[in-house]
Image (cartoon, rainbow, N blue to C red):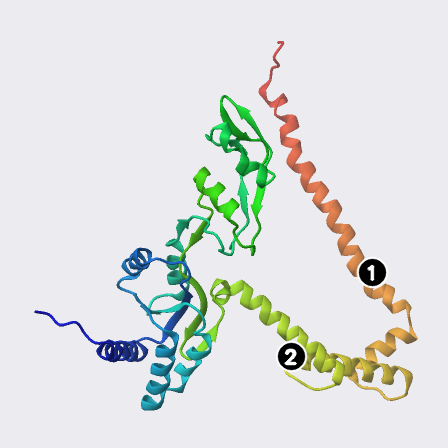
C-alpha cells in the first residue's frame, strides 16, 4: 500500500526542486496564471517540454526558498526574483531563446465564457445578425438596450453593440445573453510579466527590440550626451569633434580680426583681401559643369545617328 506524502514532505520536495532549477537555469520567465485551468497548464508543459520547465507554487514558499538558497550559495542575484513574485504567478525556467519561448507560451490560450463579476480584459462587441433565439427572448436585449427585430420567427440584432468595455465587471444580464448567444469573448493563458536573465529583471517588451531599434536608441542617447556636453562645456568623447570645430571657428575669427595668423587662416585672409579670387576659384568648377552637358549631348547625338541612317543602307524602300 502506497502511503501519501505529508504536507511537510511535499514542501521539502518542492524546496529541493526549486533550488535545483535555480542552480541549473539562469533564465526565468515570470508569468501570470489567472483563470488558467489545470488541463491548459498541462498542455503548456507538454508544448515546452525539452527546453523549459513550468513551476507553479505559493509565493510565500517560493520567496522563502529563494532567500534561503541565496544565503547558502551566495548567489545574491536570484533575490531579484522576489519583488516580481506578486499575484497568481508561475516560473518558467528555460535554456532556450527567451523570445521564442515567450511566443510559444502565448499560443496556448483558451476561450472562456463571461462569468458574472469578472473584470473584462477586452472590449466585448456583439455582432449584428440572426441570433437563432425565439421572440420570447427579446427581454434580454431590451434590458441591455440592444436594437433588434423579428426575422423569420427569430430575433435578429440590427447593429453591432459594445456590450462590455475593457475593465468593467461582467453583469448577470450580459453574462446570460452571451451564454445564450454562445459567445466566449475572453481568452486566457499564461501571460509573461517579467523576464529574469542572469540576475537582471526587465520587461518582456525588451525581447521585441531589434538591432535597428537598439542602434536608433543608442544614436539618440549619443546625441543627448553631445547636446548636454556642449551646453555645459563639459568635454566628452561624443562632443569632442564639435568642440574642436567650434574652437577652430573661434580662433579663425580672432585671426581674421587681428594681425595674428596661422597657416589655415592665411588662405581665408587672402580671399577676404581680394574677393576676385573667389570667382577665379569657382570658374574651373563652373566650366567643368558646363562642359559636361554639351559632351553628354554630343554622345547622345552620335548614338542616335546610326538609327536614322539604317533605312538608307538597305538600298530600297517599302514602296520601290
In terms of depth relative to the viewer, which is nearer, 20 or 281?
A: 20
Residue 45 location, x and y as percent?
29, 61
| Left or right: 144 as drawn, with respect to 4 | right
Closer mark to the observer between disc 1 and disc 2: 2
Q: Residue at x 74, y 85 (%)?
A: 233
| Left or right: 92 as drawn, with respect to 207 | left
Which one is earlier in the sequence, the residue at label 1 or at label 2? 2
| Left or right: 279 as drawn, with respect to 242 | right
In terms of depth relative to the viewer, which is nearer, 80 or 243?
A: 80
Residue 247 location, x and y as percent?
77, 83
Q: Which residue is mark 2?
A: 238
Residue 15 location, x and y as percent?
28, 79
| Left or right: 196 as drawn, with respect to 291 | left
Q: Residue at x 76, y 53 (%)?
A: 289
Q: Which residue is mark 1?
A: 283
In terms of depth relative to the viewer, which is nearer, 39 or 229?
A: 39
Q: Residue at x 59, y 69 (%)?
A: 217
Residue 51 location, x and y as percent?
29, 65
| Quadrant of image for the N terminus | bottom left
Tell me: residue 57, above or below residue 154: below
For the residues labelled 1 and 2, the Cα–Cα distance comes to 39 Å
In terms of depth relative to the viewer, which is nearer, 134 or 230?
A: 134
Quarter of the image holding residue 312?
Answer: top right
Tell me: residue 110, above or below residue 230: above
Task: Give the structural element (helix, strand or loop) at label 2.
Answer: loop
| Quadrant of image for the C terminus | top right
Q: Which mark is residue 186?
A: none
Amino acid at each position: 500500500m502506497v502511503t501519501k506524502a505529508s504536507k511537510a514532505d511535499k514542501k521539502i520536495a518542492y524546496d529541493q526542486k526549486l533550488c535545483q532549477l535555480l542552480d541549473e537555469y539562469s533564465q526565468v520567465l515570470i508569468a501570470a496564471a489567472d483563470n488558467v485551468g489545470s488541463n491548459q497548464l498541462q498542455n503548456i508543459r507538454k508544448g515546452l517540454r525539452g527546453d523549459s520547465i513550468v513551476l507553479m507554487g505559493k509565493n510565500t514558499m517560493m520567496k522563502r526558498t529563494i532567500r534561503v538558497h541565496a544565503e547558502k550559495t551566495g548567489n545574491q542575484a536570484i533575490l531579484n526574483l522576489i519583488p516580481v513574485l506578486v499575484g497568481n504567478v508561475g516560473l518558467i525556467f528555460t535554456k532556450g531563446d527567451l523570445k521564442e519561448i515567450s511566443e510559444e507560451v502565448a499560443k496556448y490560450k483558451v476561450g472562456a465564457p463571461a462569468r458574472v463579476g469578472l473584470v473584462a480584459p477586452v472590449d466585448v462587441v456583439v455582432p449584428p445578425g440572426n441570433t437563432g433565439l425565439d421572440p420570447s427572448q427579446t427581454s434580454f436585449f431590451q434590458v441591455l438596450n440592444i436594437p433588434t427585430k423579428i426575422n423569420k420567427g427569430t430575433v435578429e440584432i440590427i447593429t453591432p453593440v459594445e456590450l462590455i468595455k475593457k475593465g468593467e465587471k461582467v453583469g448577470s444580464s450580459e453574462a446570460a445573453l452571451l451564454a445564450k448567444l454562445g459567445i466566449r469573448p475572453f481568452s486566457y493563458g499564461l501571460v509573461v510579466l517579467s523576464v529574469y536573465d542572469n540576475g537582471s529583471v526587465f520587461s518582456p517588451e525588451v525581447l521585441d527590440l531589434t538591432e535597428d531599434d537598439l542602434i536608433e536608441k543608442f544614436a539618440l542617447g549619443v546625441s543627448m550626451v553631445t547636446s548636454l556636453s556642449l551646453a555645459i562645456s563639459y568635454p566628452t568623447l561624443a562632443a569632442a569633434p564639435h568642440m574642436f570645430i567650434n574652437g577652430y571657428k573661434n580662433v579663425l575669427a580672432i585671426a581674421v580680426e587681428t594681425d595674428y595668423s596661422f597657416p589655415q587662416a592665411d588662405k581665408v585672409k587672402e580671399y577676404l583681401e581680394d574677393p576676385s579670387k573667389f570667382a577665379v576659384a569657382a570658374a574651373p568648377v563652373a566650366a567643368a559643369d558646363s562642359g559636361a552637358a554639351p559632351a553628354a549631348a554630343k554622345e547622345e547625338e552620335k548614338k542616335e545617328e546610326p538609327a536614322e541612317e539604317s533605312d538608307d543602307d538597305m538600298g530600297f524602300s517599302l514602296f520601290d
